[in-house]
Image (spheres, helix red, strand yellow):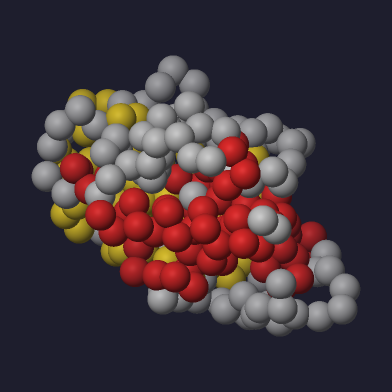
Amino acid sequence: MNTAVNSSRLAQLIVEAQREGNALGDLEENLYPKDFTSAYLTQQAIFNLRGVQPGGWKVGSKSATGPIQGSPLPLECIHTQARSFDRNAYAPAGLELEIAFRFNRAFEPRDHDYSDEEVLAGIGEMAAAIEIVSSRFAAWPKVEPLTQLADLLNHGALVVGAFVPYQEGFPFAQPALAFSFNGESIVPGAVANPAGDPRRLLPWLVNHHTRQGHALPKDFVITTGSFTGMHFADGPGELRGEIEGLPPVTLSLT
């Protein structure tokens, strides 16, 4: 079986697992993605099989100088705040507090990459966001990284607070923040985005997306990795995230 066939079959299994609510166990070895190309092919096949359109991206990196990766996000999985979610539909539900961006322009495909300066000049708005992280694999988080990438980087849902105009001088690397579940703080001892300044992820995203021949619309929501690590909810409750200088974001888990 070739890469495209394997990616299509893996995508089909992931979509079926999500639809039926049955987490995937061990698969045939040849179905697991062997490189980034096959992982990204699986992402696109998932969108095709589900018949959904992207409404944004999640991007991240494990370090301030490390490689960047990302996944498109289904439009139907991006929500405004004060939404209620069935915790069992995302079990185990990992919760992350992030900063999301929107551009003030679209980026069209072209025959050369966009520069960092060109991309950063296009940032228009920013907001606090909470991602519900969820996998289609029973062994998660002990799942090989390329398989997690193929599985839309373990995306469950994204809840975005109100957007405000972009502030170039904002302390993006280490903002002051609060994150609570049922009124109790779930902020870890160290608060930082592993990617460093999350804006460094944006040029990679623009070029990765447009190289595929797709325009990046200015209304896409782009979330850029957790400042608080991942908190696993062990029951229902109210979640509230506050990043100083941005409107708060809230959601309920039932």
Q: Position of residue 146 (x, y in %)?
A: 61, 42
Percent across and percent down for residue 229 are: 45, 30
Q: Quadrant of the C terminus?
A: top left
Q: Residue at 54% of width from left, 66% of height from top?
A: 45
**Residue extending furthest toward the top:** 189
x, y percentage for residue 18? Answer: 32, 54
Q: Is residue 48 left or right of residue 67?
A: left
> In screen coordinates, is 47 left or right of 231?
right
Which quadrant holds residue 2? bottom right
| Figure quadrant of residue 81 | bottom left
Instruction: Please state the total of marks drawn on the protein image.
Output: 0
Q: Nearer the viewer, residue 3 or 107?
A: 3
Q: Is residue 71 above or below residue 119?
A: above
Q: Which of 206 and 51 is in front in this view?
A: 51
The residue drawn where x is 29% and y is 35% is 92
- Seen in the picture, residue 232 relative to 119 is either above or below; the reply is above
Residue 248 appears in the rendering: no
Q: Which residue shows up at 81% across the image and 80% down it?
A: 110
**Which residue occupies the extreme right position in the image?**
112
**At 64% from the left edge and 34% from the top edge, which residue is drawn?**
62
Above or below, comparing residue 203 to residue 110 in the picture? above
Note whether 153 is above or below 168 in the view shown: above
Question: Residue reaching furthest front?
Answer: 1
Q: Which of 228 and 215 is in front in this view?
A: 215
Q: In which quarter of the image is the N terminus?
A: bottom right
Q: Is residue 187 visible?
A: yes
